[in-house]
Amino acid sequence: MGRDTPLSADQDILVDANIFYAIGRPSNPQYQRFRSAVQHAGVVCKLPQRVIGELGGAETDRVRTALDEEWAEIIDAPSPTDGDAVAASDIARRTIASETTKAEHDVEKTDAILAGLVIQYVRDRSTTGVVVLTDDQPARKGIENAVRAQGYTDAITVYGLADIIGDDPGDSMRLI
């Protein structure tokens, strides 16, 4: 692979849709590097149902390949009765609205849900930590604010795609 990854098998990895858009189809070099990094680290990427919806469903080639090769799995959103998850989602939504000057009700729901999921995962699972992968800067700030407000800064980390596969100037920048 040529570079170390910050991912490890004792972490849960939650992935935002923009990561799968950025890596493209399974034939793209970015997809292949991402798959290699994930498999080398021995992790399984958790894809929330809303992320799957944003990507066009579980049958799109980028998702189907990841599921078939078992380096990704689909997970459910946090329970609407989980107070910590709801509070984290609310904090993320307010932060994202502030960062983007959108009304809170116009903020992408998946980004806010990721904040709730990450709190739920770190609280309810026996991993050493949770990683969120997103290249959406307002979402990243929203998740980080929610994590800080909930007191989980030592257990939750947010990375972007470049942190996992590096920057290759030969990569295509087109959205697929």
Image (spheres, rainbow, N blue to C red):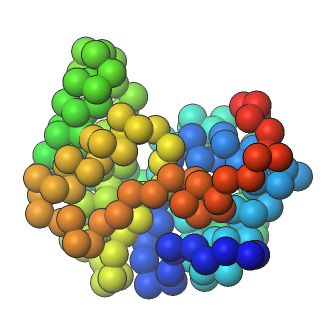
Residue 102 pos. (x, y %): 30, 16
In the rendered view, does 68 fall on the left or right side of 161? right
Residue 90 visible at all: yes
* Residue 122 image-quadrant placement: bottom left
* Residue 99 image-quadrant placement: top left
Residue 2 pos. (x, y %): 74, 76
* Residue at (80, 39) in percent of width and height: 172
In the rendered view, does 1 fall on the left or right side of 5? right
* Residue 39 image-quadrant placement: bottom right
* Residue at (74, 71) in percent of width and height: 36
* Residue at (57, 41) in percent of width and height: 18
In the rendered view, does 80 fall on the left or right side of 107? left
| Image quarter of the N terminus | bottom right
Residue 80 pos. (x, y %): 22, 46
- Residue farthest toward the right in the current orientation of the protein: 27
What is the total number of numbered labels drawn onto the structure image? 0
Along the line of sight, the residue nearer the viewer: 10 or 77: 10
Residue 105 visible at all: no
| Image quarter of the C terminus | top right
Q: Is residue 104 above or below residue 147?
A: above
Residue 142 pos. (x, y %): 27, 41
* Residue at (88, 52) in percent of width and height: 27
In the rendered view, does 13 fall on the left or right side of 89? right
- Residue farthest toward the front in the current orientation of the protein: 169
